[in-house]
Amino acid sequence: MANLALLKFSSEDCGTCHRMSHYDEKVASELGCSFINVMLQDTDTYRKYRNILLAKYPNKEGMGWPTYILVQDIETEKLIIGELKGGMPKGDFRNKLSNIINSN
């Protein structure tokens, strides 16, 4: 599946988000996805991608920290393919993201 992008919605105040930042972008790249880190404090980036977050979580209830949303064709269709929520070890993250990619 071409043109996949993984958006990471996180906060500067989230310790789990920081721990995962040591490997999440690298794993996404290895699996053929572009990676976009959407920090809630980065107003411009958040505004650009908030419609994707709000499509999945209209009132932000049920989000994990961090929340990853995998989309196809980020600049055009913005079709949501799947999501991952909350912190997890590198191996689990890789397996879960790979499963989402391979199931579509």
Image: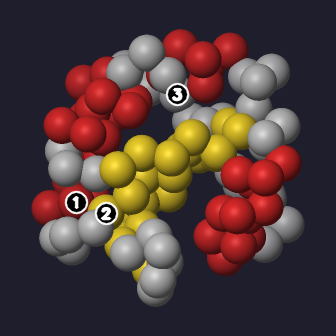
| Residue annotated with mark 2 | 4
Q: Secondary structure at mark 2?
A: strand
Q: Amino acid at mark 1?
A: Ile
Please give the residue where the numbered disc 3 appears in the rendered image: 87
Q: Tell me what residue is drawn at x 38 percent, y 32 percent.
A: 25
Cα separation, mark 3 vs mark 2, equals 21 Å
In the image, residue 18 lies at what x, y percent?
A: 60, 17
Which residue sits at x=71%, y=51%? Answer: 45
| 102 over 54 or under it: above or below | above
Distance from Cα at disc 1 to Cα at disc 3: 19 Å
Looking at the picture, does residue 90 appear above or below residue 29? above
Q: Which residue is mark 1?
A: 101
Element under label 1?
Answer: helix
The quarter of the picture where the N terminus appears is bottom left
Q: Could you tell me residue 39's position as x and y percent?
A: 71, 39
User: In percent of the image, x 24 and y 24: which residue is there?
Assistant: 91
Q: Quadrant of residue 35?
A: top left
In the depicted structure, whether residue 4 falls above or below residue 15: below
Q: State the image quarter where residue 56 is shown.
A: bottom right
Q: Is residue 55 visible?
A: yes
User: How many other residues sit within 10 Å of disc 3, few (<14), some (14-19) or many (≥20)?
Assistant: some
